[in-house]
Amino acid sequence: MSVIVEDKNKNIILMCKGADSVITERLSKQSLSSKCFLETDRIVTRYANEGLRTLYLSQKTLNRKEWEKWNEEVQ
């Protein structure tokens, strides 16, 4: 599930939530190699192995032209 929001500073942000496997396959190489992701993945994997349901949250700041192009295509 995704949502696009504009914050008070006029930044356009795409926010997503979903299964760890779905979100992981959509991450950049830079994100996949980040310390934050590697630690999060380790913890989430441990929770999943214990039978707990896990979700990832992600976000990306979009430039206005990128968002306008996408918005025109979906309407």
Image: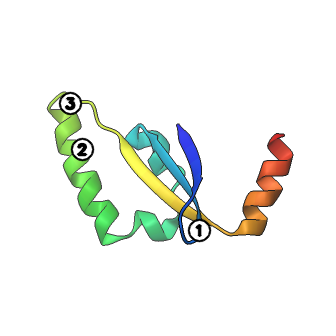
Question: Which residue, given by chain and number where applicable, does mark 1 sit on?
Answer: 11
Per the image, label 2 sits on a secondary structure element best described as helix
Classify mark 3: residues with Cα within 10 Å, few (<14), some (14-19) or many (20+).
few
Q: Which residue is painted at 48% across and 41% down in the image?
A: 22
- The three-letter code of the residue at mark 1 reads Asn
Nearest to the observer: residue 37 or residue 11? 11
Q: Which residue is painted at 29% across and 37% down in the image?
A: 54
Q: Mark 3, mark 1: which one is toward the viewer?
A: 1
Q: Which mark is residue 52?
A: 3
Determine the image quadrant of residue 14.
bottom right
Q: Which residue is painted at 36% across and 70% down in the image?
A: 34
Nearest to the observer: residue 20 or residue 65? 65
Distance (Cα) linking label 3 and label 1:
34 Å
Q: Earlier in the sequence, mark 2 or mark 1?
A: 1
Relative height, residue 20 to residue 35 (above, below): above
Q: Which mark is residue 45?
A: 2
Q: Which residue is painted at 14% across and 32% down in the image?
A: 50
Residue 63 image point, x, y percent = 68, 69
